[in-house]
Image (cartoon, rainbow, N blue to C red):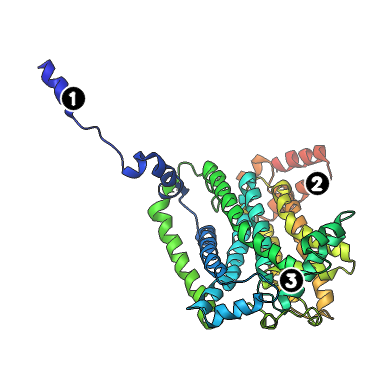
């Protein structure tokens, strides 16, 4: 009997989990995507992160295919783009996908950043910092790509933007000559920009993996900004369905830009070949840089304008340090929600101002909106602190009915505490408690 039991135990197959959980290589991907525990209350704003991954893949594939027909030479670059549009099979579509893909990339990036600011995702500092690194790399990549068609706006945009290096003390002029490869934007500049434009995406992919690694290590934030360890669901099927729906909505708008109105977000001046002897009346970057360009031209001093423009972007690194609230999400801060939408409104308005001519009233409007942009960023931590202070009151008040006497008591109590009259505030609280 003992021998039979032993044989039966040996022959009994062990229960195993799904193949994706047993294979060591697949298990890494499975734990990062398929069975990844996610908070149960994530909303549609979290879909923009996965849309950014889709944008990156689209840009990598379309850029790789375009590179097989593009010629990085100042005499042939513009003609090679025309060749792609006219002679290459479906080349017009491929080029429109790549050109409008950058616009979709930045739409998703700005929505992703706005979601992080509203729901306090920046308190995961490592994840946030890698995200800001990615944002800066994407801006650099977009600028380099904008110069490659070698049209009028490409050439003069490259001239204006690279000239900003000259404001760097001591080494600025030397850096500018090194970037140009000569005394002005020339063929050497185009070749360098093309090389960097080809290599930077691989750096971006590496930073994306680091961004996701640190995100999945601690888990996603949620709209309430609270711990959600006991309220999680697997990523599939709950959030794959949401992301697929987001991809469908993304594709509708993207295909409209590609097939119906490919120049909606572009600039018609780039259909003229680059001419160093003829400066356009109004040199401007692509729409996704317009907010920074509007801030740049709002300040008359060249160096001051460049520094403030740069600050308007790198201020994102300071956001985690400026947080002063007890809660992560702005769901609990009504006044800060107003400040947030003022920030969004100033950003959109600056984007519109950047596309206007440099004349009144756009100059003064740009200056006012620049002040509002920075003021809303600085006002946010102050209003967080004030709101938390306003919600602090003695425990015995929680049982009192909310009436005019209650508001009168709370107003006096907060006023005394704000002017550092702690003893007077306690006396007032004890007096009211006996009423």
- The answer to whether the residues at label 3 and label 1 have Cβ atoms under 8 Å apart is no
| Residue at the spot of label 1 | 9
SS class of the residue under badge 2?
Answer: helix
Whether residue 96 is visible: yes
Determine whether the residue tagged by mark 1 lies in a helix, strand or loop: helix
Q: Nearer the viewer, residue 153 or 409?
A: 153
Q: Earlier along the polypeptide chain: callout 3 or callout 2?
A: 3
Specify which label sits upstream in the sequence, 1 or 2. Answer: 1
Q: Which residue is mark 2?
A: 418
State the residue position of label 3: 350
Contact, mark 3 vs mark 2 (Cβ under 8 Å): no
The circle drawn on residue 243 is: none
In the image: residue 152, left or right of residue 182 = left
Image coordinates for residue 55, horizontal then vertical, percent: 53, 64
For marks 3 and 2, give the one nearer the viewer: 3
- Badge 1, how many Cα within 10 Å: few under 14, some, many 20+? few
Q: Quadrant of residue 358?
A: bottom right
Q: Hey, which residue is sitting farthest top in the picture? A: 2
Q: Can you tell which quarter of the image residue 288 is in?
A: bottom right
Q: Nearer the viewer, residue 81 or 408?
A: 81
The location of residue 297, given as percent across then percent down, is 82, 71
Tell me if residue 256 can be seen. Answer: no
Mark 3 and mark 2: Cα distance apart in space: 36 Å
Label 1 vs label 2: CA separation?
Answer: 75 Å
The C terminus - image quarter: top right
Identity of the residue drawn at 42% across and 57% down:
240
Percent of width and height locating residue 412: 78, 49
User: Which of the two discs, 3 and 1, labels the residue nearer the N terminus?
Assistant: 1
Query: Horizontal and vertical percent for residue 386?
Result: 74, 50
Which quadrant of the figure has residue 300? bottom right
Q: Is residue 75 above or below residue 411?
A: below
């Amino acid at each position: 009997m003992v021998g039979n039991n032993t044989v039966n135990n040996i022959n009994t197959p062990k229960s195993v989990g799904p193949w994706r959980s047993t294979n060591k290589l697949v298990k890494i991907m499975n734990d990062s995507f398929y069975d990844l525990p996610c908070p149960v209350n994530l909303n549609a704003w979290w879909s923009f992160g996965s849309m950014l991954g889709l944008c990156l893949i689209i840009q990598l594939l379309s850029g790789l295919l375009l590179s097989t027909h593009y010629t990085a030479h100042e005499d042939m670059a513009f003609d090679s783009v025309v060749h792609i549009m006219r002679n290459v099979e479906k080349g017009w579509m491929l080029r429109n996908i790549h050109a409008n893909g950058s616009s979709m990339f930045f739409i998703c990036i700005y929505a992703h950043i706005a979601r992080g600011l509203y729901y306090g995702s920046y308190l995961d500092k490592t994840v946030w910092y890698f995200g800001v690194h990615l944002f800066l790399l994407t801006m650099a990549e977009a600028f380099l790509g904008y110069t490659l068609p070698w049209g009028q706006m490409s050439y003069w945009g490259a001239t204006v933007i690279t000239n900003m290096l000259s404001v760097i003390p001591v080494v600025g002029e030397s850096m500018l000559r090194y970037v140009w490869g000569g005394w002005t934007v020339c063929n050497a500049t185009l070749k360098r920009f093309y090389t960097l434009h080809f290599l930077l995406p691989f750096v971006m992919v590496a930073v994306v993996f680091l961004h996701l690694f640190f995100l999945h290590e601690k888990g996603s934030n949620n709209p309430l900004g609270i711990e959600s360890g006991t309220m999680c669901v697997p990523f599939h099927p709950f959030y794959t369905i949401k992301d697929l729906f987001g991809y469908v909505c993304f594709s509708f708008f993207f295909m409209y830009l590609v097939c119906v109105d490919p120049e909606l977000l572009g600039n018609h001046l780039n259909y003229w070949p680059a001419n160093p002897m003829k400066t356009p009346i109004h040199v401007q970057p692509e729409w996704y840089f317009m907010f920074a360009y509007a801030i740049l031209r709002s300040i008359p001093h060249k160096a001051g304008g460049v520094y403030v423009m740069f600050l308007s972007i790198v201020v994102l690194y300071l956001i985690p340090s400026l947080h002063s609230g007890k809660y992560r999400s702005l769901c609990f801060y009504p006044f800060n929600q107003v400040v947030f939408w003022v920030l969004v409104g100033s950003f959109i308005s600056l984007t519109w101002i950047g596309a206007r001519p440099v004349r009144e009233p756009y100059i003064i409007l740009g200056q006012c909106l620049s002040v509002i942009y920075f003021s809303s960023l600085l006002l946010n931590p102050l209003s967080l602190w004030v709101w938390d202070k306003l919600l602090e009151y003695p425990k015995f008040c929680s049982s009192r009915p909310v009436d005019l006497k209650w508001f009168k008591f709370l107003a006096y109590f907060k006023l005394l505490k704000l002017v550092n009259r702690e003893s007077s505030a306690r006396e007032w609280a004890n007096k009211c408690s006996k009423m």
